[in-house]
Amino acid sequence: MEHRITGVMIYYYFVCKRKLWYFCHQINMEAEHENVMLGKILDEYSYQRDDKHINIDNVINIDFIKEHQELHEIKKSKAVEEAGIWQVKYYLYYLQQRGVYGLKGRIDYPMLKKTLVIELTKTDEEQLEKVIGEILEIQKMKTPPSLEEMKLCKNCAYHDLCLI
């Protein structure tokens, strides 16, 4: 099992640890899910003048970087805003670990016409190190974590796998 931690893994950690486990074990239900497809369309048609999908080490995939040393992540809604915030903080952390300092992050919600500025603090770095350790533990599990049903479940691509 690979020990690289991707931005998607950080995002899923904050959304649902069971979904994270499925992802880590290459059980992917999202390819044809309508919410995921909508997000991809939104990403494709938003901010078309910017260079997008900057892949670094096959670990993080930044939606785009603009002048003023800002990296951007595009999100459809604020439904799981905390997960998006931690994903961007992880991008900043990952880049700092590779000697890139002074960046800020921004989450763009084109459908809401809102943005959120994200900065990485020392406390955030400590929290991310704990999260990374927990993700590695979840990866090692033989079975998925127990189900914690949330209101997000009804729109999740893994709904049938978890609940039926």
Image (cartoon, grey):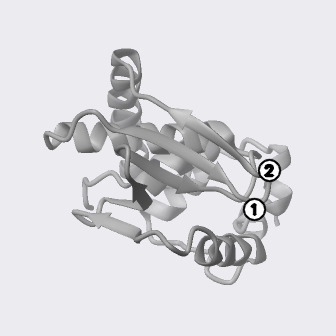
Q: Front-most of 138 and 65?
A: 65
Residue drawn at point x = 85 percent, y = 46 percent:
151
Residue drawn at point x = 69 percent, y = 78 percent:
37
Identity, as a three-letter code, of the amino acid under mark 2: Leu
* Position in image of residue 149 (x %, y %): 79, 45
Q: Quadrant of the C terminus?
A: bottom right
Q: Front-most of 59 and 159?
A: 59
For disc 2, the marked residue is 152
* Position in image of residue 138 (x %, y %): 43, 45
Q: Quadrant of residue 161?
A: bottom right
Identity, as a three-letter code, of the amino acid under mark 1: Cys
Where is 111 relative to 91, above or below? below
Residue drawn at point x = 68 percent, y = 84 percent:
32
For disc 1, the marked residue is 156
User: Left or right: 115 with respect to 137?
Assistant: right
Where is 32 relative to 8, above or below? below
Q: Quadrant of residue 114?
A: top right
Instruction: Say if mark 2 contacts mark 1, CB within 8 Å.
Output: yes
Furthest residue in direction left, as rendered: 99
* Position in image of residue 126 (x %, y %): 34, 20
Task: Report whether residue 23 is seen.
Answer: yes
Residue drawn at point x = 23 percent, y = 35 percent:
101
* Position in image of residue 16 (x %, y %): 63, 46
| Secondary structure beneath label 2 | helix
Q: Mark number for residue 66?
A: none
Crowd class of label 1 (few under 14; some 14 to 19; many from 20; radius 10 Å):
some
Where is 57 relative to 29, above or below? above
* Separation of residues labelled 2 and 1 (CA atoms): 6 Å
Q: Front-most of 50 and 116?
A: 50
User: Left or right: 31 with respect to 62?
Assistant: right
